[in-house]
Image (spheres, grey):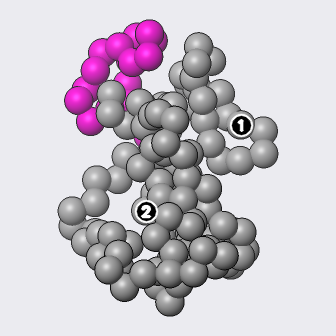
Amino acid sequence: MHPKTASKVHFEYIDDDWHAQYEQMNLTDWIDQGTPYDTGSVMQYGSYGYAAYNYTPTMTYVEDGVDTGVPVEGQRDGASSMDIWQICKLYGCGKCNGFIIDSYDGDAYKNYMNKCTNADRYYWSSR
């Protein structure tokens, strides 16, 4: 899923020198992994990292096509479970996070990971 469907970027609140970091990627360059957008990814910017004003979020969550106004959280603790799944899928690993993977097709990640109760996020039972 493309991140634009999960969050809204507020360019008016981003320092001008950082606008290029938030431009939408050309969809012909996008590799759709067939997974939900992972706001817990180590690649996800937090809402205040490049803000022109420290108190105004640069990105907010979108639910059902509506901007919620809730700032997107970022994390730098390490790769999320979905980050690991996507890396394994890209490289066609036969084993991922200790699990033998029969197929990466469709939503196969649901066969190996648990769904968080209040979010469209997944985690490895062994993590």
Residue 54 image position (x, y, % from top left): 60, 74
Of 17 and 20, the residue lying toward us: 17
Kind of element beneath mark 2: loop
Amino acid type, residue under disc 2 in the picture: His
Left/right placement of residue 35 relative to residue 121 reads left
Report the label total.
2
Give the prevailing secondary structure in the magenta stretch: loop
Q: Which residue is mark 2?
A: 2
Residue 39 image position (x, y, % from top left): 55, 52
The residue positioned farthest toward the bottom in the image shown? 12
Kind of element beneath mark 1: loop
Tell me the distance, in whole angstroms, between the alpha carbons under discs 2 and 1: 20 Å
CB of mark 2 within 8 Å of CB of mark 1?
A: no
Whether residue 105 is in magenta: the answer is yes
Residue 117 image position (x, y, % from top left): 78, 39
Residue range of the region highlighted in magenta in the rendering: 89-106
| Vertical arrangement, residue 29 with respect to residue 79, above or below | below
The residue positioned farthest toward the right in the image shown? 118
Residue drawn 55% across the image and 53% down it: 74
| Vertical arrangement, residue 1 with respect to residue 123, above or below | below
Residue drawn 28% across the image and 60% down it: 30
Left/right placement of residue 59 relative to residue 79 reads right
Which dot marks residue 30? none
Q: Which residue is mark 1?
A: 116
| Vertical arrangement, residue 113 with respect to residue 82, above or below | above
Amino acid type, residue under disc 1 in the picture: Cys
Quick one: quadrant of the C terminus? top right
Q: Dot 1: within a 10 Å radius of its alpha carbon, few (fewer than 14), some, or many (20 or more) residues?
A: few
Residue 69 image position (x, y, % from top left): 71, 76
User: Is residue 49 among what the camera can see?
Assistant: yes
Q: Dot 2: within a 10 Å radius of its alpha carbon, few (fewer than 14), some, or many (20 or more) residues?
A: some
Residue drawn 23% across the image and 29% down it: 91
